[in-house]
Image (cartoon, rainbow, N blue to C red):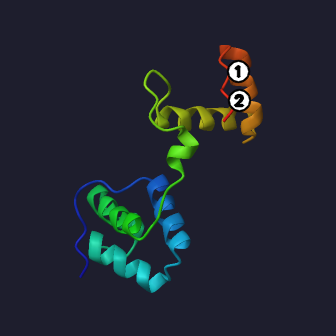
């Protein structure tokens, strides 16, 4: 019998990260479910506790998984938007514009704020 934790589950974004890691690492369903059971005592990622998620992610990271989150959110930048705020800005842009076009969003941000990104 599977005993779930009474702590809140993980977010849909965290579930998506697990599925990206599974695919990137080439784990089949049986291996993936064994990892969930070993590190989270569950058979489905939707049942994971936050602690179980951290354990599974430590395992995936040990196997070489690297999320592109820091690349997408520009890392830690004191005085600038946090990764969560950057994600929220992108979500608001998609809802407002009806588009996921980041170049258009960046143009709008630069025009509106007067802030220009440095070329990388």
Q: Is residue 63 left or right of residue 110?
A: left
For label 2, the SS is helix
Q: Is residue 94 above or below residue 112?
A: below
12 in relation to 94, above or below: below
Q: Which residue is mark 1?
A: 110
Quadrant position of residue 107: top right
Taking 55 as reference, is 79 left or right? right
The residue positioned 25% from the left and 68% from the top of the image is: 4
The residue nearer to you, when weighing 93 against 105, is 105
Residue that appears at 76% across and 35% down: 103
Rate crowding at label 1 as few (under 14), some (14 to 19) or many (20 or more) other CA atoms within 10 Å: few
Q: Residue at x 48, y 82 (%)?
A: 29
Quarter of the picture containing the N terminus is bottom left
Categorize mark 2 by other alpha carbons within 10 Å: few (<14), some (14-19), many (20+): some
Q: Position of residue 35 (x, y in %)?
A: 35, 76
Left or right, residue 100 beside residue 19: right
Check disc 2 and report the residue beneath it: 106
Percent position (x, y) of residue 9?
A: 34, 57
Q: Are the residues flagged by discs 2 and 1 in contact, CB closer than 8 Å?
A: yes
Q: Which sits in the foreground, 108 or 95?
A: 108
Q: Nearer the viewer, residue 119 or 86?
A: 119
């Amino acid at each position: 019998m599977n005993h779930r934790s009474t702590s809140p589950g993980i977010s849909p974004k965290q579930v998506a990260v697990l599925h990206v890691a599974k695919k990137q690492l080439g784990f089949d369903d049986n291996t993936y479910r064994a990892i969930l059971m070993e590190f989270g005592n569950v058979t489905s990622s939707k049942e994971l506790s936050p602690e179980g998620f951290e354990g599974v992610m430590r395992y995936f990271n040990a196997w070489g998984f690297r999320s592109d989150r820091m690349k997408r959110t520009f890392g830690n930048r004191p005085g600038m938007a946090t990764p969560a705020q950057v994600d929220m800005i992108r979500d608001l842009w998609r809802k407002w514009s009806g588009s996921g076009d980041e170049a258009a969003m960046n143009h709008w941000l630069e025009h509106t704020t007067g802030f220009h990104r440095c070329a990388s």
